[in-house]
Image (cartoon, rainbow, N blue to C red):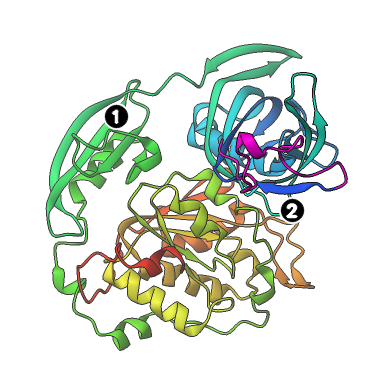
Amino acid sequence: MHIIKSQRNIAASYMPPNPYDIGPSDPKEYKVADTSTYELNVQFDDPIIIYDDGDFEFTSDKYNLDPAPDSIGEYKDEEYNVNVIDADTLYDIIYGQLIKKHVTEKYPSGKYRVTGIITLQFDIDDVEYDEEFHGVDEDGDPDYSRDYYADNADATLVKYELTSLNITAEINSASDIIVSADDEETWDYLKSKQVTDSDGMLTDYTLYVNSDGSRYICMFGDNDVYEPDPAYADWEGDSEEEAYEWFNNYTSGYEDDDDIYGATDAEYEDDIQEIGQEFTSENTSINNNRLPAVFNMVSFEPGTVNIDYGGGKFDNVAEYLTQYDVVNLVYDPYNRTAEHNKEVIRLVREHGGADTATCSNVLNVIKEPEVRINVLNNIKKLVKPNGKVYITVYEGKGNNAEGPTKSGYQLNRKTAEYMDEIQQVFPDAKRKGKLIVATNSSGSVTSATNESCYDNNILTTL
């Protein structure tokens, strides 16, 4: 670690007894110049309930973490006195990792105990400290103390990994280990064909089945590059008949260029409609530090563009995704200017549509069902054919007692209760716990050009 020090002339012939030329009552402020890496290993041991509808939740009334967070629920780098993550966010990450490992699909409904280790890596920069000189020791070396403080420090989560995961079924107060989720699912090739991608080139569309024949997936992209992975599958199901029907009828939506390219700005902008709300979402964008939970549940492909619909007034998500080579474009009619939203639409159109879309805690603050449907239709128009759409909602009390709040409106509905509306626009939408995943299987994006917009610097800030 390189530390910026005082620029004093300390040549040996002129070095005073105090090489820093400061006394105990004259502390000097310094700052860490290079990034420091901090790694946190946390063991967890929690009961969960898997429900018949595929949802699951942690049921412990406290965090079962080792080491435990501090009294206010934070983990801190003790050396630099910097808060790196809170227990709520840590549980969002664990929850998202369990979804990615398809826990609710592998096990029947019931109560289970989940144990594992979550390893997190952070980059810490702008850590300041005071250094106070106390004289020299018996060897003539400077004796000083250092106090770190975190007024302007920043800790960024750059990597996390879930390991040693075991799922145990609780039966008659005894626990029997039934599976280790570290065992990767294996896939067998069934069939492949060529389809047109967004650049007008031919690529593979491949059907796979897992080793026990209980699950089928279709992968879009060259099959020598994209290995079978349910997290990135274009389609997923458990019926052989449905799998072959989907595969045989599948078209990418890029075959007819006239449907994708050549629209004017006015034609495209008119295609994105906003319907007035009794209670706007302007005051619901309140968190500029903590990432929305959806971004801890989803892995994005490097080199892609995500449209964050209703993403609020802050840019912390865009900054977070930049490290993964993902461009995040926020479209928000209530928290961004008309000029900003117009530019986002233009960039999405130039890219041929967003590769993915996120809609986090938006639907739950909209009173009118027609407005919620309009939001979903707008997302559909902005996402490439076969692009993934990730939706989460804030459940609140989950008791359907909807009504105005001090910041707007709240539906207080469970995630499952949004599925009917979402499936009106995205018929194949599926819920994986508190994450809803849909594929824009029949959409097409109007675009004036097929030139990539990755080189435009504005992408990283919109």
**Magenta residues, start to end:** 1-25
Query: Which of these two is toward me, 133 or 186?
Result: 133
Label 2 Cα crowd, 10 Å radius (few <14 / some 14-19 / many 20+): few
Image coordinates of residue 418 in percent, x first then y, are 57, 59
- Would you say 119 lies left or right of 225 here? right
Residue 114 sits in quarter: top right
Q: Main secondary structure of the magenta part?
A: loop
The answer to whether residue 52 is seen in the rendering is: no
Residue 88 sits in quarter: top right
Identify the residue under disc 1. 209
Say which label, 1 or 2, has the lower sequence index.
Answer: 2
Residue type at the position of mark 1: Val
Tell me the tag on residue 151.
2
Q: Is residue 237 above or below residue 325?
A: above
Q: Residue at point 44% right, 44% down?
A: 299
Q: Is residue 411 above or below residue 325?
A: below
Query: Which of these two is toward me, 368 or 11?
Result: 11
How far, Cα to Cα, is label 1 from label 2?
A: 53 Å
Q: Residue at point 54% right, 23% down?
A: 163
Image coordinates of residue 324 in percent, x first then y, are 42, 47
Label 1 Cα crowd, 10 Å radius (few <14 / some 14-19 / many 20+): many
- Would you say 140 lies left or right of 211 here? right
Image coordinates of residue 202 in percent, x first then y, are 11, 51
Disc 2 on helix, strand or loop?
loop
